[in-house]
Image (cartoon, helix red, strand yellow):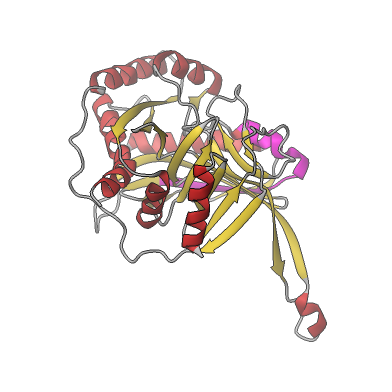
Amino acid sequence: MFFELIDRATEQLAKNLPFVLYRKPNANSVHGIFQNDAQLHYVNDFTETGFVFAPFDTNNPIILLQVNENILANYEPSNSSVRVNNLPEIDTSQKEFHINLVKKGIVQIQKGHFKKVVLSRRVDVVYDSSSIDLFQTLLASYETAFCYVWFHPKVGVWLGATPEILLKVENQHLTTMSLAGTQKYIENENPNWGTKELEEQNLVTQYISDAITPSVSDLKISERTSVKAGKLWHLRTKLRGKFPKEKLYEIIKALHPTPAVCGMPMTDTKTFIAKHENYDREYYTGYLGELNFKTEKGRVTGRRNQENKAYRSIKTNTTFFVNLRCMQLKDNIAQLYVGGGVTKSSDPENEWQETVAKSNTMLQVLVANYTK
């Protein structure tokens, strides 16, 4: 069934029609959503149903793929992930620009204009593989990430393996997270977090808590934990609460873009990013996922009442992931997007090295396909 889904996506791509294939973290199934025309549909107020693809810039429209066909196929994860040891030599042509960019951000923080700003860059790599093949390599390489390939003829092809949830909603229960701080994963070693990473994580957690508190009740904040994503460690804190469903649009507007992808205060850091990064992020650090999907679950109501054991409940689910560790395919160029959070404790050279480490997530996939 999985390869039938792959064939269906290949056919859709050949017809130049929109689709998305995706697998949720640690899942054993792949979803395929297909739209039967090439029209661009948009989200208006988040009461719609479909697959959302949202840009970083909140002034730009949010794309909604219509669910004309929805296929779910079993997928058996491979026993070993795809790893390539001989990655291309690091392209240092952007190093001076990025280090100077980080220095500019630190100056603004020292002057009291920001508390944190997220600065990124784009890496262009020649590739020679189909987007469908690259997606299958993503699946085999990053089992704990949200892996996807998304296509619309009027927008293009995007792929990614992101570790970060923007929000997850089941009926009126909401879960979100702050994910910040990055270290390389070293086998058999636990991460040793420094002042910069802990400070960054605290800023993001506090911002998200403040942003959703007006709309969410019974808010609970978990302990900070270290989580592994590919060959990287991150710090994560989960936040959970309840909210009235008419508040969903309000919550999303309050959350995006979070300090984990933009900075704080949001308006000032967003202006700084637009002025100084020197490229358009487009859908990098936006978000994507299911909006108002219905799921049916069986419930056992009591041992004595056998007739009620067949009772089923319908739940409405929305799950959005932040579009990190992603790339856009244009002709024979894969455009990889990487960035990192800058605080008053940041070291510009270390920030450069962090973007290099993050670029390996997508480079692994490209090189693995190139060497097949």
Task: Determine if the magenta segment contains residue 199.
Answer: no
Residue lying at 82% horizontally and 82% vertically, measured from the top left: 307
Q: Position of residue 151 (x, y in %)?
A: 51, 39
Q: Which residues are magenta?
A: 235-254
**Is 316 displayed left or right of 182 in the figure?**
right
327 or 270: nearer the viewer: 327
Tell how many labels.
0
The quadrant in which residue 18 appears is top right
The answer to which of 286 and 216 lies nearer the viewer is 286
Q: Is residue 243 above or below residue 327?
A: below
Judged left or right of residue 183, residue 322 is right
The residue sitting at 49% across, 47% down in the picture is 237
Tell me where residue 184 appears, x and y as whole percent. 28, 45
- Residue for point 52% across, 57% down: 5
Q: Quadrant of residue 337?
A: top left
Horizontal and vertical percent for residue 243?
72, 45
Q: Residue at x 33, y 66 (%)?
A: 79
Could one spot residue 298 in this view of the protein? Answer: yes
Is residue 193 visible in this depiction of the protein? no
